Image (spheres, rainbow, N blue to C red):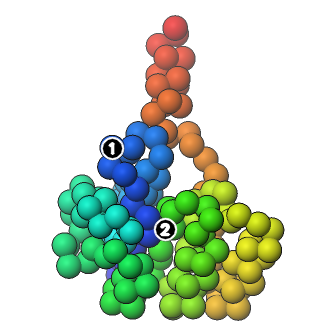
Amino acid sequence: MAYKIAVVGTGDPAQTDRYAMAYRHAQGFQQLDSCELLGAADIVLENAVEFADTFGIDEGNVFEEYERMLQELQPDIVSVCTPPKTHAEIVTDCATSGVQAIHCEKPMAGTWGECQEMVTVCEREAVQLTIDHQRRFAKPYTKAKAVLDDGR
């Protein structure tokens, strides 16, 4: 049985080589047989629709409100790829919705207090919380690696 994956904050499709981190999360999930990319939510619905088209997500599983997505799809794992000031609220909402794990983009939150709240809620709800903090697969870094590998 595959884990049901949902993404909150798909980002601007024109920025997939820079700041639309959800695209990188989705590419990673698609490489795992144990994961099924099931849903997407973004406050800019057109962005979520484009993301869903890119990754083969059913149009009925695209949402403007992440709360509705959590309720209707009941995902096992949620990637949070929104601006940092929204992380605490979204992560705690996800944790109390019944998900098993949350993978949140960096930085973790806007304040130390919000970080503590996120950890407290996830621990209380027995939800695994991870924070992404690498960019090694972003275009500028992969290009630099290719240049090095070519000996230039």
The local secondary structure at tag 1 comes to helix
Question: Where does residue 92 sit, x and y in percent of width and height?
Answer: 61, 82
Question: Where does residue 71 sit, x and y in percent of width and height?
Answer: 39, 91
Q: Nearer the viewer, residue 152 or 10?
A: 10
Q: Residue at x 64, y 91 (%)?
A: 125
Image quarter of the N terminus: bottom left
In the picture shown, does residue 95 fall above or below 147? Answer: below
According to the picture, the residue beneath numbered tag 2 turns out to be: 79
In the picture shown, does residue 67 fall above or below 78? Answer: below
The local secondary structure at tag 2 comes to strand
Q: Residue at x 46, y 41 (%)?
A: 18
In the picture shown, does residue 148 fall above or below 110? Answer: above
Tell whether 140 sits left or right of 16. right
Q: Amino acid at mark 2?
A: Ser
> Residue 107 is drawn in which quadrant?
bottom right
Q: Amino acid at mark 1?
A: Ala
N-terminal-most mark, 2 or 1: 1
Mark 2 neighbour density, 10 Å: few (under 14) some (14–19) many (20 or more): many
Question: Where does residue 28 sit, x and y in percent of width and height?
Answer: 42, 56
Question: Where does residue 36 sit, x and y in percent of width and height?
Answer: 33, 71
Q: Which of the labelled discs sits on residue 14, or is there none?
A: 1
Q: Residue at x 58, y 69 (%)?
A: 86
> Residue 88 is drawn in which quadrant?
bottom right
Task: Residue 37: tell me if it is visible.
Answer: no
Q: Which of the labelled discs sits on residue 149, or is there none?
A: none
Cα distance between the residues tagged 2 and 1: 20 Å
Is disc 2 in contact with disc 1, using a CB cutoff of under 8 Å? no
Q: Residue at x 34, y 70 (%)?
A: 40
Task: Residue 141: tell me if it is visible.
Answer: yes
Tell whether 95 sits left or right of 108. left
Tell whether 95 sits left or right of 123. left
In the picture shown, does residue 133 fall above or below 136? Answer: below
